Image (tube, helix red, strand yellow):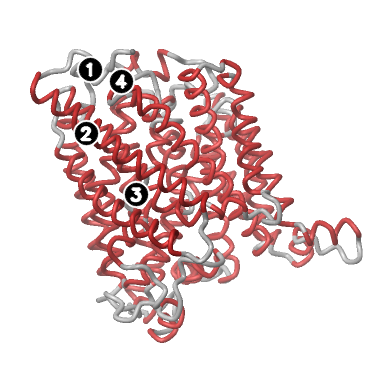
Amino acid sequence: MSITTLAISSAIVLWLGYRFYGRWVATSVYGLGEVDDAQMPSRSQANGIDFVPTKRSILFGHHYVTIAGAGPIVGPAVAVTWGWLPALLWVVLGSVLIGAVHDLGALVLSTRNQGRSIGDLCAEILSPRVRILFLIFILLALWVVLAVFAFIISSLFVDRPESILAVWIEIPLAILVGWQLMRGKSLAIWGGLALVVMYACIGIGSTESVRSFLAFDWGESGAGNFLSQNAGIFWLVMLFGYSWIASILPVQTLLQPRDAINSHQLFLALGALIAGLVVLSVSGSPLLEVVAPAINPSPPEDAPLLFPFLFITIACGAVSGFHCMVASGTTSKQLASEKDARSIGFGAMVLEGGLAVIVILCCVSAAGFANGEEWASKYSSAWVGKGALLPRLSGFIEGGAAFIGAALPFFSPAFLATVITVVIISFAATTMDSATRIQRYVIEELARATGPRLLANRHVATALAVTSAAALALMADQGGKGGLVLWPIFGVTNQLLASLTLVVLTTWQARRGRPILPTLIPLIFLTVTVGWAAITKMGDLLDAASIQWPQVMVLGFGMMLQLWMLVEGMLCMQRSSREGQDDRIDALGVVQLD
C-alpha cells in the first residue's frame, strides 16, 4: 500500500466525519444555533482583555494552534512503534468520534454558561464537592504543561539555534499584525507579509555568523561562555517572561494575531506537503513507499503494551483533556456566534487529526527512512517514547522536508527542515502562552470558590501561575528539567482529564434532556482504556526500586477523582431518568448558580 492511498483514504474519512457526523452532533446533540449572538459571553461580558468577540477565521487559528502544540506531532511519531495501522485507525476514527465531540461539547457548555471552565461548572452539573478537586487537578496538569513545554522549546533552541531568530521575530510581527487588524486591515495580506519576514529570518538565522551568535559561540568571551553553558536556562527564563506578558495583554494585541500567523504557517506547510505528495505520486517516486509494517511484529522489549498505551501515546492527535481547558478557557470567551462553534470546536480537532495523519505517513515512508531496516533500527531496537525530543521528531522533520522539497526543489533540505522546526516551536510556544492565560483563569475560579480575593486579581493570578511553573522547571539540580519529574504520568493524567470532561458533558446532556450516546460511548471507552493504563502505570511506579512519590500522588489523585466523578455522574443521570427534565438546567443547557 502506498502513502498516497493512505493519505487519500484518511482525508475522505475525516472530511465525511466533519461533513455529516459533525453536523448531526452540532445540531441534534448540542443544539447549535439556539442561542442569539448577543448572549455569547464575548459580547455580554466584553471587557476588551479576555472577553472579545472575534471573527471565525481568527478564532479558528487561535483555537487550532493552541490545542495542537507539539502533541499531534510527537505522539504519532512515537506511536508508529506498534505499526502504522493501529496509529492511523485511532487518529482517524478517534478524532471524529471522540476528540471532536469532546472539544465541541466543552466549547458549547462553556459559552452557554458565562464562559466558565468545565472544572468550575462541576459545582452545578455534578456536585459542589468535586469542583475544587477538579480545578486543582486541572491546575496540576497545566503546571506540568507550562514547565515541560518551556523545557522542550528551550531544548530545541539549543539544538537548532538557526530557528531562534524566526521564532522571536514573530512576537513584534504579531503585535504589528494585531494593530493592523484592529484598524480593519486584511489578515491575509498582513499575515502573509509576516510569514515572508519569518522565512527570511530563517535564511538569515541559518548563516554561520548569526547561528554562532545565537548559539552563544562568542569565542573566549566570559559572557559567551556563561550563556553557552546555561543556554537552556536562559531561554527557559525568557520564555516564562514572554508568557507572563502575553497572558495579561488583551487577546487582540498579541494572542490572536500570533495564533493567526501560526495558523498561516501550518496551512502553508500542509499545502506544501500535499503538493509534494502529489508531485511524488505523479512521478512514481520511491519516496512514497511504506517502509514500516502495518503492525510491528517485534516492538522494543521496553515498549508498553499496544493496548491501552496506544490511546495514551497519541493523545492530541485523537483526543486530549488539554483541549477542554482551551475550549472552555480562552476560546469560549472569544466566540462571536454560536454558529461558528462547529467549525472551530469540531473542525479544528478533525484538522488536528489530519496533521497527525501526515506525521504518521512521514514517519513510515521512504522519505523519512531509506528502508525497512533503517526504520526498524529506530523503532524496534529501543522504545523511542523516552529520551531526547529531537530523535522522536527526526522522521517527521526529515520526511516532511523531503515531501516539501519535491514541490519546492529550489529550497535546500536543511532550510525546509528548519521551517518545519519553526512550525513545531511556534505551536509549542502558542500552547505555552495560552496555557499561562488558562492557568490564570483557573486560579481566579479557585479563588472565587474558596475565598481569597487577592488571587482573583489577574496580575496576582498570572504571577502565581508563572512563578510556580518556573520554580518547578528550575528545581535544584534539574537544569530546567524539573517538569519532567511529573511528565512520565502526564499522558495518563491528560487522558484522565478527557474522560472527566466527558463525565460532565454526559451528565449535562442527560439533565437537560438531550441525547447522551455520542458522549456516553466515548466516556465508556476512555474510562476502560485510561483506567487500565492508570492502574498499569501505578503498578510500575510502586514496583520501581526508587518510588517517585510525586508521580504516585498525582496519578492516585486523578484515579480517585475519576471514580468519584463517575459515581456523581451516575447518580445525577439516575435522578434525571427518574424525575424527568431537571429544572436546575434548562433546555439550552444554562445551569442555575448555587
What residue lies at 34% left-to-right and 78% top-to-bottom?
Answer: 292
Residue 44 point in image, percent of width and height: 40, 13
State the quadrant of the N terminus.
bottom left
User: Crowding near pointer 4: few (<14 within 10 Å), some, many (20+)?
Assistant: some
Mark 1 in CB contact with mark 4 (< 8 angstroms): yes
Q: Is residue 279 visible?
A: yes
In the figure, 195 relative to 182: above or below? below
Mark 1 in CB contact with mark 3 (< 8 angstroms): no
Q: Is residue 575 left or right of residue 464?
A: left
Residue 277 point in image, percent of width and height: 37, 68
**Three-letter amino acid code at the position of disc 2:** Thr
**Three-letter amino acid code at the position of disc 4:** Glu
Residue hosting label 2: 506
Residue hosting label 4: 124
Nearer the N terminus, badge 1 or badge 4?
A: 4
Could you say which quadrant of the image residue 502 lies in? top left
- Which-is-in-front pick, marks 4 and 2? 4
Residue 537 point in image, percent of width and height: 39, 58
Between the residue at mark 3 and the residue at mark 4, the CA separation in whole angstroms equals 33 Å
Mark on residue 585? 1
Residue hosting label 3: 351
Nearer the N terminus, badge 3 or badge 4?
A: 4
Between the residue at mark 2 and the residue at mark 3, the CA separation in whole angstroms equals 24 Å
In the figure, 168 relative to 435: above or below? below
Between the residue at mark 2 and the residue at mark 1, the CA separation in whole angstroms equals 13 Å
Q: Is residue 131 left or right of residue 94?
A: right
Q: Secondary structure at mark 4?
A: helix
Could you say which quadrant of the image residue 107 lies in? top left
**Three-letter amino acid code at the position of disc 1:** Ile
